[in-house]
Image: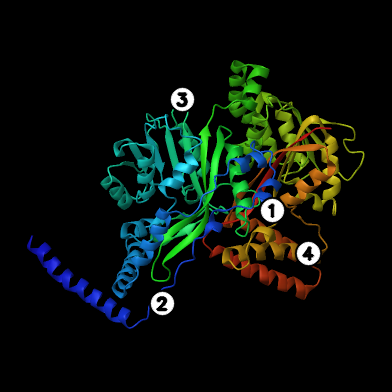
Amino acid sequence: MANANGAKLILKPILILLLAVFVHFSTRQQIALKAGRPITNMDYEIDRDAILKFHSDAVTVKPPEVLSKFVQLLPDDETNQFLVDSADALSTRSALLKMQFKQLLVQGLQKVLGWSRPDARGFMGVGTLYVASEKQLEAVLRSVVKPNQATKSILDIGSGTGTETAKLATLLGVVPERVLCLESSKPLQKKLQSRGFTTADGSIPSDSSFSFVSLLNVLDRTDDPHGLLRSAIGAVDAGGGTILMAAVLPFQGIVHGKFGSKRRPFNGLKIRGSSRSASFELGFFRFIEAIASEHPELELVSWSRLPYLSSGDTRRTHYTLDMAVMAWRVKELKDGEERVKEIIGEEVLGTVEAEGFSGIDVNVKACGNRRDDDVYAFLASTLRKDGVAFWRDVLDAGAGMGSMCWLLRQGQKVDRIIEVTAASDGTYGSNMLLEVSKEVEKVVVEAGNWRDDEFLKGRTFDVVVADYLLGAVELHWAHGADGMMDRLVEAAKVGGYLLISGLEPYEMVLDRGNDDDRLVLDIEAIGESAAFVAGESTYREIPETWVLRQIGRLGKFRVVDSQQFDMRLTVRSLMKQISYAKDMARKISDADLRKGYLTRVATLERELKSSGGEFWGGRNYAIVVQRVK
């Protein structure tokens, strides 16, 4: 006890001294506080003509109906009062000094105790967030929550300090004890508990169900937004319920970690054509497209545009971002899956699903323990949602072990797989594929080049797979992407499907101003440049937009769905590109030029090995189309 008291006696004057030093230096600095951007009616308005121009087969609600569901809001007294309070809280010299000290403590909590940025800011009360007023929320929810329909319970995911949770509870007439707040931050949990809410920091309790679920600006701060949303949908009462979402647009996922770190999500929301410079309208349509493609049981009922506000700091009185608030109804899922059941029967469907996942074909030695990645999972689920029960005759137009093993995992859905390769050796060579065909009768290997007009001429298939094929065409067919698309179209039966996956060219998605992105771009460039100088063919990745334009030009397909996926590059995978660059450089005939290239490759190799180990700037894409004529 004496030691504890002694420690307190020592600690107290140290803290007083630190505070005195802070005040001394703070008073010598001029704090220039600026007013935040004014909030006007324009922050709540949309370009209606722009909405009508968008189209996506993944979104069952078409643009005119999307527009009809828009709820026009305006700044109101509660919103204006928040802005006034934010400015008043920083209106004096002492208030600014207090805020400066809080910001210093926020940095200390992150750097010394390892807290995340949201935890530290929430604990210190820095940056109070404001989604909407109670009246604005009521206007958005009016079409989905009826006055005579009692809301029994609320699940609020990512509750923060609970300010918006409290508004929803009051609006819906739910007592605090019937509100469960899912919040991972321990400091913020205590604030929520002080409001009377129940808290949990893990998964949603399996024995609980709720009539109302809210996810307000949380999908962009989690590693697996689709997984979180699936859990939220599963928590809705069997009799139906409402999911309220808010999202800053254009959507950009960032996960905050310990010691103030931040990174991209491991399995983020895949937004097609995502761009920070996209308009609000395009950002909104792409967001609901990403949601609808993975969660067809969600029906958009109403939505609005609002500014997402944050109270200020020592620089500005407040901050604002563009945001959409959306009310969704959870409906019973039918459509494609019900059609599958009608075609083959529910009992048979269960057998097909089981054998498709772990059937006899999966045990091919060469496939090992390969599992479906996000792209393959998307392609398979999209076919199922479109009512395809059996794939029958499949053409793997650019064979590889990945695509072949994925097709084998479909089990009895697939009757025959034609594997096409232009090489005899290597990972994608016919020799390796022939070994597999000896084990599995349904696998047939066809060695040939698609530039040969007679190759597989006149043969058609129920499903045609072009797995990263268009980028590889350049190795065997210079500038052959156009011709390859024509061949793929002719290979699909009328009523059949074409499945295309590819890699967005790095230069279209990476930022040379970012050190990690610049390193990836330099590694790719040195390999391609060396191949060009050595007179060798190389890959030329084709962007998703080009593929979709070609499909539109051909006029024989309907786009069922398309999606982009964040691509994780590791040191190990980039070392393969380094090895490729070395191989190409060694083929350069000029000795001085060869030496220069090898020196540059060695420099990039050292930089790569000393890097953080993971790179998240790249994007893959997947497209599912059906031939209609």
Q: Name the residue under label 3.
A: 239
Choose top left, top right, bottom left or bottom right for residue 354: top right
Residue most toward the front?
77
Q: Mark 2 points at which residue?
A: 32
Q: Which secondary structure lies at badge 2? A: loop
Task: Give above or below for 78 relative to 179.
Answer: below
| Upstream in sequence: badge 1 or badge 2 | 2
Amino acid, disc 1: Glu
Report how far apart the C-alphas of labels 4 and 1 lie in the structure.
28 Å
Q: Which secondary structure lies at badge 4? A: loop
Amino acid, disc 2: Ala
Q: In this view, does 524 lie to the left or right of 69?
A: right
Can residue 452 be seen? yes
| Upstream in sequence: badge 4 or badge 1 | 1
* Tag 4 near tag 1, CB within 8 Å: no
Q: Which secondary structure lies at badge 3? A: loop
Residue found at x 86% / y 31%? 459
Amino acid, disc 3: Gly
Locate residue 168, reporting x and y percent. Answer: 39, 42
Report how far apart the C-alphas of labels 3 and 2 lie in the structure.
55 Å
| Upstream in sequence: badge 4 or badge 3 | 3
Q: Is residue 86 left or right of residue 457?
A: left
Assign the N terminus to one quadrant of the image: bottom left
Amino acid, disc 4: Lys
Q: Name the residue under label 1.
A: 504
Q: Mark 4 points at which residue?
A: 587
Residue found at x 82% / y 49%? 481
